[in-house]
Amino acid sequence: MRLLICGLLTFVFVQMLLYARSPDSVVDMWLVTLNSAGQIHIGMTADALVKTTGEEGSTLVDMKLEGTFSPSILVSYKDKKTLVAADVRTDEKNQWVVTRLTIYDSRFHTDSGIHIGSTYSDVKAKYPHSKIISGEGSEALFDTKAGISFILTSERLVQNATVERMIVVASH
């Protein structure tokens, strides 16, 4: 019995050492920032994105934005539901890099708590300087400081709309 208890305590201690991290090193895999959505960052190469998300969770597609060739890597997990579309373009080194992120999954959130499903009022309360913009058939609230467009559902009154996706573009 003593041997079993010692073994169990040793196992717990080793697990604590293996997974012990400082609070600064913990990455919120669902946090949307000025240049990222979780572990996907604007500027990362397409190869690094596929390595991060896994080949089975990455699908190259043409989004045909505004009628032009628009390559994007759709990121999904086991349920095959698209979480993020990462638009890619070639850079000055002729490498494919991520230039824009479109977020579809409600688990992603900003540091202010805004996520897919948040209301127009929620966004305006957290991002009071955001402005209504139109493009690609949708209306959005865009906040230049956050670098995020909150794409809204189509409603007769925009004040009744909710966030249906978020877009993060490369900051300049």
Image (cartoon, rainbow, N blue to C red):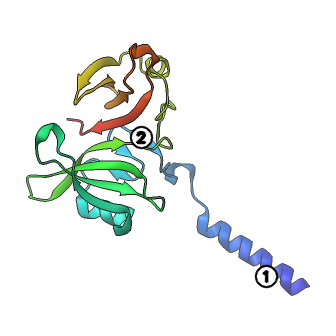
**SS assignment at label 2:** strand
Query: Could you tell me the amino acid type at mark 2?
Result: Val
Residue 59 marker: none
**SS assignment at label 1:** helix
**Callout in the foreground (1, 2):** 2
**Residue 5, visible in the rendered structure:** yes
Is 63 left or right of 68, judged from the image as shown? right
Q: Which residue is mark 1?
A: 7
Q: CA distance from mark 1 to mark 2?
A: 42 Å
Q: Position of residue 14 (x, y in %)?
A: 67, 74
User: Which residue is nearer to you in this view: 64 or 115?
Assistant: 64
Quadrant holding the N terminus: bottom right
Q: Position of residue 93 (x, y in %)?
A: 9, 57
Check disc 2: other Cα within 10 Å, few if <14, some if 14-19, many if 20+: many
Check disc 1: other Cα within 10 Å, few if <14, some if 14-19, many if 20+: few
Is 37 left or right of 48, judged from the image as shown? right
